[in-house]
Amino acid sequence: MTASPESPANQGARAAKAAMPRDIKVMLAAAFLIALGFGLVAPVLPQFATTFDVGATAAAVIVSIFAFMRLVFAPAGGALMGRFGERPVYIAGLLIVAASTAACAFAQNYWQLLVFRGLGGAGSVMFTVAAMGLLIRLAPPESRGRVSGAYASAFLIGSVLGPVVGGLLAGFGLRVPFLAYAAALVLAALVVRTQLTGRSGGAKQGGAAGPAMRMKEALGDSAYRAALFSSFSNGWATFGVRMATVPLFAVVVLAGGSASAGWALAVFAGGNALALTFSGRMADSFGRKPMMLLGLIVTGLATATIGLTGNLPAFFAASAAAGFGSGLLNPAQQAAVGDIIGRGRSGGKVLAVFQMASDAGAIVGPVLVGLVADGLGYGWAFGATGGILLLAAVGWSAAREPMQRGQESVDSPN
């Protein structure tokens, strides 16, 4: 007699009660240290650049070069992961960023700072792509959403605490946070090197999980194509416009002062944290696609609304709603890519292209939105950003549900 398949809701409930694997806890600890360190540097980096007698534009380039190098080096990072495995590339990426960040602390001129910061971007994409690969391989398939949500929460907590600590350290000199970030990265590398067993999923320790998924196969999957579009849109809105245009809107249009810009980012983080408390489990219980659609729609509508607000309370409410929507979609999106690749094989190139889509959105979005804001106004600028997110929702509505019920196979249907 054949047993009836377990329902998605029961499968998700069982996954929620299961203990988090030890290796996943190691990855969470490393993620917290990385985000904490990045938060130490982020508030002081532009200010440090201006100490070399350059203007605001040149200081902004110091920030942009990091994202640009992430984008350019992503294919190489994916190839390295396919050849050497996730853990060695993860550790190497951390150490590269640690060395480049420490070098920034001793930069003697603007051009040295630019080169050192750019090299850090190459290391950053190495450990970012490798971390995604490790999470896919180490997390049980039925718990991918929960694990992705926990990983995002660890990053969020670290990124919130980082600027607070960084501001205190800056009182001892603008070079001190860079050294503290380098130390945090070295500590994270040591944690992974000594504590991560890498034995889950049947892959060799430190090696690749198995045969690599081909890009042609991935691009033939409607879910992967939708994930690329949503990654680009999320990068555009969440990592680009939120950091570059939202604070400017608060200061210039709403005349809220510099404090309002900080509060806008804080309430976004608050909404994000609230959604992350349950969104990963819901993605495991009800599927990735429903959560992707809900998250993209909420984030898109809330982002479009930001440009229509005329006072700070409404602005903060819209920002919090956008953060909530982002918290709904991000665990489901990462889990969906994990489902597409599967636990039994490597996804270096596939993950690299997925990450490139987000970085491309983060680079292109603020530039185009800035042009629209200058020419047509902030209402049109935020409306266009919300529209990009809603178009990504349309793309997901036509895509397949990537989560496989029951036993996960290496080859998934299109």
Image (tube, rainbow, N blue to C red):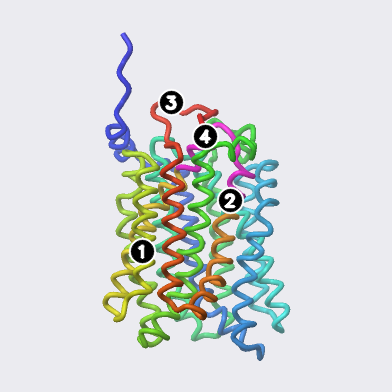
Which residue does the numbered mark 2 point to in the structure image?
129
Query: Left or right of 180: which side holds 336?
Result: left
Residue at position x 32%, y 67% in the image: 320
Give the mark nearest the N terminus, 2 or 1: 2
Give the mark nearest the N terminus, 4 or 3: 4
Q: Position of residue 231 (x, y in %)?
A: 51, 54
Q: Position of residue 78 (x, y in %)?
A: 65, 48
Which residue does the numbered mark 4 point to in the structure image?
343
Q: CA distance from mark 2 to mark 1?
A: 25 Å
Q: Position of residue 239 (x, y in %)?
A: 49, 65
Give the mark nearest the N terminus, 4 or 2: 2
Give the residue type at disc 4: Arg
Q: CA distance from mark 4 to mark 1?
A: 32 Å
Residue at position x 29%, y 29% in the image: 7
Give the mark nearest the N terminus, 4 or 1: 1
Dividing the picture into quadrants, the one containing residue 5 is top left
Give the residue type at disc 3: Gln
Q: Which residues are magenta?
A: 336-353
Give the mark nearest the N terminus, 1 or 3: 1
Q: Are marks 4 and 1 in contact (CB under 8 Å)?
A: no
- Tell me if residue 140 can be seen: no
Q: Is residue 117 magenta?
A: no
- Which label belongs to residue 407? 3
Which residue does the numbered mark 1 point to in the structure image?
322
Give the mark nearest the N terminus, 2 or 3: 2
Local SS, label 1: helix
